[in-house]
Image (spheres, rainbow, N blue to C red):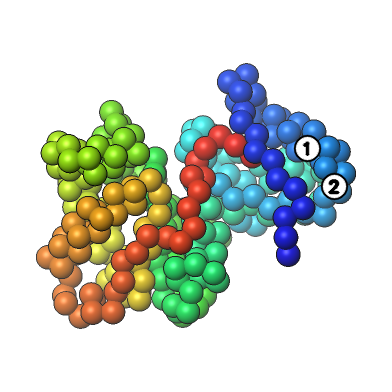
């Protein structure tokens, strides 16, 4: 298939006060302009999503909890609505067309303002009724005084303090990754998010740290790579 139309909407501070109503209005304005009729709505976003109900248990960028995204859109537009966590959607795309293509066992770890995990085992996406599966947002890897983009850019430019912070973050992240590797023994470990801007510094740090935590046989077939697809899914757009 191909895209019929695209639109990127930046929500104003006023619109963010009632984000769900603003999203409905943005869709209502977009459709007549493009002479489109909705057949269904599919959305993906970071955080904890109940895939059958469409309820968003936690949307970290806006710190929204128990957000009735799916039910509200279905009532407003009277079409089927699918809401999914972005990492689960992302690992499916990587499995079909990206860095995990032809790999039966892969793990994708997304690091940004929070941490999310998508898993494919024996070619099947691991899902659960629970919105918490794959959500590691309770683990914070970086100090809040600096953005990940800034940290990576300064570390690449040779700033020793930022390189030390990145090294510490790699150590904490590797402890999460080591547990996932022991549990799933994937052929590929994909990292996505702003932190991969410094992959030439980060990946050797991760390899070194993982080698000190795991038996060698776990690392024989493991490949650590950046994701093929990348778009910051935490920006306030629709």
Residue occupying image coordinates x 23% and y 79%: 220
Q: Residues within 10 Å of mark 2 (few under 14, many from 20)?
A: few
In the rendered structure, the answer to whether residue 111 lies left or right of residue 85 reads: left
Residue occupying image coordinates x 51% and y 45%: 233
Specify the quadrant of the image occupied by residue 134: bottom left
Which residue lies under the disc numbered 1?
A: 30
In front here: 177 or 135?
177
Which residue lies under the disc numbered 2?
A: 36
Question: Relative to 205, does residue 66 appear above or below in the rendering?
Answer: above
Secondary structure of the residue carrying numbered label 1: helix
Residue occupying image coordinates x 23% and y 75%: 219
Question: Relative to 135, does residue 76 appear above or below in the rendering?
Answer: above
Residue occupying image coordinates x 54% and y 53%: 85
Q: Quadrant of the N terminus?
A: bottom right
Q: CA distance from mark 2 to mark 1?
A: 9 Å
Question: Relative to 9, does residue 186 appear above or below in the rendering?
Answer: below
In the rendered structure, the answer to whether residue 13 lies left or right of residue 72 reads: left
Contact flag, marks 2 and 1 (Cβ < 8 Å) = yes
């Amino acid at each position: 298939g191909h895209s019929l139309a695209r639109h990127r909407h930046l929500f104003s501070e006023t619109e963010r006060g009632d984000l769900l109503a603003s999203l409905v209005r943005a869709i209502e304005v977009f459709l007549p302009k493009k002479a489109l009729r909705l057949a269904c709505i599919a959305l993906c976003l970071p955080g904890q999503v109940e895939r059958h109900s469409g309820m968003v248990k936690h949307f970290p960028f806006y710190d929204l909890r128990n957000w009735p995204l799916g039910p509200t859109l279905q009532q407003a537009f009277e079409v089927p609505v699918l809401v999914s966590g972005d990492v689960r959607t992302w690992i499916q795309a990587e499995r079909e067309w990206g860095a995990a293509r032809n790999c039966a066992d892969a793990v994708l770890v997304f690091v940004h303002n929070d941490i999310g995990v998508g898993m494919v085992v024996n070619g099947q996406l691991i899902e659960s009724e629970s919105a918490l599966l794959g959500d590691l947002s309770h683990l914070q890897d970086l100090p809040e005084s600096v953005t990940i983009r800034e940290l990576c850019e300064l570390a690449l430019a040779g700033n020793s303090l930022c390189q030390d912070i990145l090294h510490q973050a790699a150590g904490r992240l590797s402890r999460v990754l080591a547990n996932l590797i022991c549990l799933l023994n994937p052929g590929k470990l994909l990292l996505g998010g702003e932190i991969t801007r410094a992959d030439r510094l980060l990946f050797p740090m991760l390899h070194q740290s993982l080698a000190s935590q795991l038996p060698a046989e776990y690392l024989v077939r493991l490949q650590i790579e950046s994701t093929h697809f990348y778009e910051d899914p935490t920006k306030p757009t629709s």
